[in-house]
């Protein structure tokens, strides 16, 4: 049981961090960013290039991933989403644009980084073993702690910084925020850049554990959407809760249901369908949006 | 006057260049060889190594002046189609090959794709070389598919027997991705293990291909304390993570798979934890590779920046097609002629040292020769590269 809980917490921390970026972008701009998984993969490959190819320390890989993805996010918002949102009132326009960016990034990743699975050497060696009741490699513990620290840092930033307050105001009521003098364009760009940066950071963190490959983007996006549906779209606490709930469900399912074959995600999806039928806005979302 | 002379000379030179250029470059007719396989998504490495092997070898042969089949010398052109590991796309790809007049296609890479294209291939006179194992593709009345590698039901028993005899393996556990290929490979692996008298202690656990943490997946498997953990049909992307998770959970037994892997991917993803990992390779281990194979690896690396060990096996398909066509030029647009040549075909194997031969096999597995003979090389990962554990032959 200890092992199942520890696995669930570790998975939950990484999932929550993935979901945070997605929900931030959705709450600020009402954009379903289907390219979020590809941004995560791109961040992983940037970290791989810095650490494994250039031989630099892991921390530099993390910083490089955050910077590259932050800049990429800002540029995507400024030159792609902003003009489309300005010219089209239809939600499908941004959804199609996001899907197009996902395909484009897939192609760019293949061209730049190739088709192979990539990984960087373990950043910490050794395994924590509590009498075979709980086994957890130290690098996973470190990544889990870093993920939780990043989540905490993000919450503090959103809560207490001027930019964070402006973005929360935007998320609550775009028009009212604009009337109160919030520079909508500027904070939309910062928000999108932060969302992309978070995706890149998770990719960089996990490249040390799971490695990264071209095909991880799509499934990562699906899981991220799953989390924000559980927690409630455009609610930051909901994304965190969704991430931990999904992580725990996965860990419990894989252990308890293993003898029935790969039915864990079947059960998760079935449960989610029932849950959404009862509470379509998710755990913490508001029924009115 | 001078101006007119210059204009006339220029026009003449241009006309001469148009007339003479084809002769100077000796434009050969083109022989199109198709590729339908997965070059995007999580399994992209499988198809990309196929496509790049084809393109490398084709460029090399064209550089040498082309391939003489009968009285005609052809340049090889590779026509590639990404099926995205989707059977519907694979059908579309094979239909495109038919429209382009291609009679010989390498791929698809997976079971459902290979099964899906069968009617299209048979109706349009296409011989195809899948990297997929279902026997019904190769057993009569099917006759247009030729297995491009060693199947797991051929390599699995050989590996298990070797490990029983040499490493004292008695208990075996299987884990597979929840997809058709790995599941069918797991099932035939279980059957083979039981037939050899091994005790199968875990055979139900599966995982999603997009799993990012294999610890919870492997926990119940390793609690059964197997001597050998078989990663059935594992993709190169998942293998390092599974190995790493198993070792980090304290597993000290053997780990093997019947699919081809890449040493650099294992080194990056699992490092020293991959030591002793057993997989099936191709013909370019240092002990077996000929100078031609070494040059192929060099050319591939120059063309694409990095070699893929999976191409050790995938280099063969184009060679078989060309050499069989050379043996019977009538087969160039008549696959029935190709089929009749299969039974007696034999040619020197340029990729292996010694007097190895290219020939078709599969009589004992399929009742007809519908498999190319590639050496069954079982590798062990040691110190960042593969070492040959043993070599066997298939028929």
Image: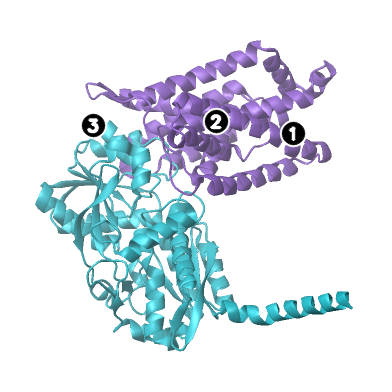
Chain colours: A purple, B cyan
Residue A256 x %, y %: 33, 34
Instruction: Identify the residue position indicated by label 2 in the image.
Output: A65
- Confirm whether residue B279 shows in the render: yes
* B203 sits left or right of B239 in the view: left
- Of the numbered discs 2 and 1, the one sitting upstream in the chain is 2
Q: Residues within 10 Å of mark 3 (few under 14, many from 20)?
A: few
Residue A48 x %, y %: 47, 36
Q: CA distance from mark 2 to mark 1?
A: 20 Å
Asked if badge 2 and badge 1 are on a common chain, one would say: yes
Dot 3: chain letter: B
Looking at the rendered structure, which numbered label has been put on residue B6?
none
Instruction: Identify the residue position indicated by label 3 in the image.
Output: B250
Dot 1: chain letter: A
Element class at badge 3: loop
Which of the 4 image quadrants contains residue B315?
Answer: bottom left
Q: Nearer the viewer, residue A95 or B28?
A: B28
Instruction: Identify the residue position indicated by label 1 in the image.
Output: A78
Of labels 3 and 1, the one closer to you: 1
Q: Nearer the viewer, residue B80 or B182?
A: B80
Residue A229 x %, y %: 58, 33
Label 2 near label 3: C-beta < 8 Å?
no
């Amino acid at each position: 049981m200890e092992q199942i809980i520890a696995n669930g917490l570790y998975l939950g921390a990484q999932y929550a961090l993935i979901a945070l970026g997605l929900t931030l972008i959705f709450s600020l701009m009402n954009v379903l960013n289907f390219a979020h998984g590809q941004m995560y993969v791109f961040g992983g490959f940037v970290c791989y290039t810095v650490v494994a190819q250039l031989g630099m320390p892991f921390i530099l890989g993390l910083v490089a991933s955050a910077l590259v993805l932050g800049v990429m996010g800002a540029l995507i918002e400024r030159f792609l989403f902003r003009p489309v949102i300005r010219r089209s009132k239809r939600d499908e326009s941004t959804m199609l644009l996001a899907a197009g960016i996902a395909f484009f990034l897939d192609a760019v990743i293949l061209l730049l980084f190739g088709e192979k699975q990539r990984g960087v050497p373990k950043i910490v060696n050794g395994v924590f073993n509590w009498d075979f009741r709980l086994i957890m490699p130290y690098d996973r513990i470190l990544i889990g702690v870093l993920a939780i620290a990043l989540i905490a840092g993000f919450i503090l930033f959103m809560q207490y910084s001027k930019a964070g307050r402006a973005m929360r105001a935007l998320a609550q009521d775009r028009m009212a925020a604009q009337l109160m003098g919030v520079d909508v364009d500027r904070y939309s760009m910062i928000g999108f850049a932060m969302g992309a940066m978070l995706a890149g950071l998770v990719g960089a963190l996990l490249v040390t554990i799971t490695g990264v490959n071209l095909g991880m983007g799509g499934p990562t996006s699906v899981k991220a959407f799953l989390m924000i549906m559980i927690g409630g779209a455009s609610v930051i606490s909901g994304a965190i809760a969704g991430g931990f709930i999904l992580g725990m469900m996965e860990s419990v399912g894989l252990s308890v249901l293993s003898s029935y074959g790969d039915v864990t995600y079947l059960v998760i999806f079935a449960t989610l369908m029932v849950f959404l039928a009862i509470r379509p806005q998710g755990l913490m979302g508001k029924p009115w949006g | 006057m001078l101006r007119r002379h210059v204009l006339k000379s220029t026009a003449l030179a241009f006309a001469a260049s148009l007339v003479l250029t084809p002769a100077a470059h000796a434009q050969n007719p083109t022989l199109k060889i198709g590729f339908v396989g997965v070059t995007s998504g999580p399994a992209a490495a499988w198809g990309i190594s196929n496509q790049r092997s084809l393109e490398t070898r084709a460029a090399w042969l064209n550089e040498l002046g082309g391939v003489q089949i009968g009285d005609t010398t052809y340049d090889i052109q590779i026509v590639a189609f990404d099926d995205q590991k989707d059977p519907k796309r694979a059908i579309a790809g094979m239909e495109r090959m038919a429209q382009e007049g291609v009679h010989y296609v390498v791929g698809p890479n997976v079971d459902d794709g290979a099964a899906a294209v069968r009617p299209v291939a048979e109706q349009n006179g296409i011989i195809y070389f899948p990297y997929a194992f279902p026997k019904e593709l190769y057993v009569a009345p099917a006759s247009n598919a030729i297995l491009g590698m060693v199947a797991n039901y051929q390599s699995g028993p050989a590996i298990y027997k070797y490990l029983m005899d040499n490493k004292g393996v008695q208990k075996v556990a299987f884990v597979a991705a929840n997809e058709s290929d790995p599941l069918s490979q797991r099932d035939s692996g279980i059957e083979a293990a039981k037939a050899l008298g091994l005790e199968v202690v875990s055979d139900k656990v599966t995982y999603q291909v997009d799993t990012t943490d294999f610890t919870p997946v492997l926990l119940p498997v390793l609690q059964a304390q197997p001597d050998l953990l078989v990663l059935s049909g594992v993709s190169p992307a998942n293998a390092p993570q599974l190995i790493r998770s198993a070792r980090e959970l304290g597993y000290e037994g053997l780990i093997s798979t019947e699919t081809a892997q890449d040493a650099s991917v294992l080194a990056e993803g699992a490092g020293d934890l991959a030591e002793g990992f057993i997989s099936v390779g191709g013909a370019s281990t240092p002990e077996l590779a000929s100078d031609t194979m070494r040059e192929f690896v060099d050319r591939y690396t120059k063309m694409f920046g990095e070699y893929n060990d999976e191409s050790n096996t995938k280099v063969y398909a184009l060679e078989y097609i060309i050499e069989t066509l050379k043996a019977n030029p009538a087969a160039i647009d008549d696959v029935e002629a190709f089929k009749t040549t299969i039974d007696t075909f034999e040619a020197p194997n340029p990729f292996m040292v010694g007097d190895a031969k290219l020939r078709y096999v599969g009589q004992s597995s399929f009742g007809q020769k519908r498999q190319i003979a590639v050496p069954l090389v079982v590798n062990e990962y040691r110190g960042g590269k593969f070492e040959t554990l043993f070599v066997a032959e298939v028929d």
